[in-house]
Image (cartoon, grey):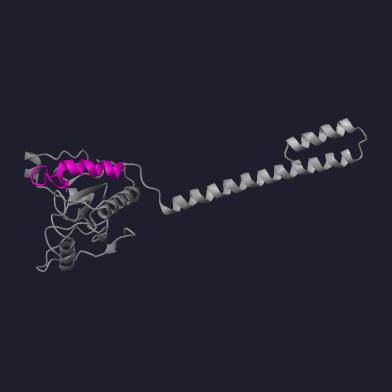
Amino acid sequence: MRYPYARWLPWRDESPDGRPTYYVGSNRPVAVVLHTMQGHAGTAREWAARGHFGQSWHYTVTRTGEIYQHLEHGDGGYHAGITATQAAQHPPTWPLWRGPATNVNHYTIGIEHEGFAGDVFTGESQRRASRDLCRWLATSLEVPLDRDHFPAHAEIDVVNRANDFDYPSAREWFYRYLLEEPDMTRDEIAAIAREEARRLLIEEDLEVDTRLRTVEAARHRLTALANDTDATRVERALRALEVGGIL
């Protein structure tokens, strides 16, 4: 599966010394792990093209808001695994962790964000791009848009990655930003505008129709008055038409 707004920069499946760089076809994602890259987007491009061994992931979100996709969702990256010893000594706090017997990389998507702990999301472009990607992934994977399904790496490797994704305070801010009411899309705004225009046209048509009916009724009354010989009745009828705004 491909994100339609991402630039496809595939991760080479073998390192220069012939080792596999990701798990081919082994991923059944039910969650998305959020990371701080601790580096620059150029490194992601270089590693993907060269087939860097030991780290790989599905998406990179740059500071400028550009998104790279490196792996298909059905392939597992090397982005969130922990050893059995690590898990035994410092168990993950992530509620959806399946235990040390199942590699986290076999049921998650990985998103790296260009930057360093403390300075990620200083620009609106990166914030918005990441939020849009996460919301699309929630829909595509058919999972809730919540913290359980979009954990920080720090919830899996609680010691070595305590500030990944970002420092805790910045992380909390981003979760509030991610989970707030989504902005309307251009198509949704256009649909609302069309519906409002249609409503106004209907109201205008009804108003014109009512006015025409009133004028037609007045015409009939004036025709009748032309043949009426009772001056008092004629004067009363003319006054009523003036009050009604017809004359």
Expressed as whole percent of the image width and height from the top left, the position of residue 126 reads 25, 54
Instruction: Examine the structure image and report whether residue 244 is included in the region drawn in magenta.
Output: no
235 relative position to 123: left or right: right
Instruction: Examine the structure image and report whether residue 160 is included in the region drawn in magenta.
Output: yes
- Residue 98: tell me if it is visible: no
Residue at image position (26%, 50%) is: 29
Decide which of 178, 140 is in the foreground and name it: 178
Decide which of 226, 172 is in the foreground and name it: 226
13 relative position to 231: left or right: left
Residue at image position (14%, 40%) is: 92
> For residue 147, what is the image quadrant?
top left
Expressed as whole percent of the image width and height from the top left, the position of residue 142 reads 34, 46
Say which quadrant the N terminus sits in. bottom left
- Residue 116: tell me if it is visible: yes
Expressed as whole percent of the image width and height from the top left, the position of residue 9 reads 24, 65
Residue at image position (27%, 41%) is: 176
In the depicted structure, whether residue 49 falls above or below residue 134: below
> How many numbered circles does the render carry?
0
In the depicted structure, whether residue 175 falls above or below residue 48: above
Say which quadrant the C terminus sits in. top right
Please report the bounds of the magenta region as a residue range: 153-179
Decide which of 75, 150 is in the foreground and name it: 150
Decide which of 57, 16 is in the foreground and name it: 57
Expressed as whole percent of the image width and height from the top left, the position of residue 6 reads 29, 60
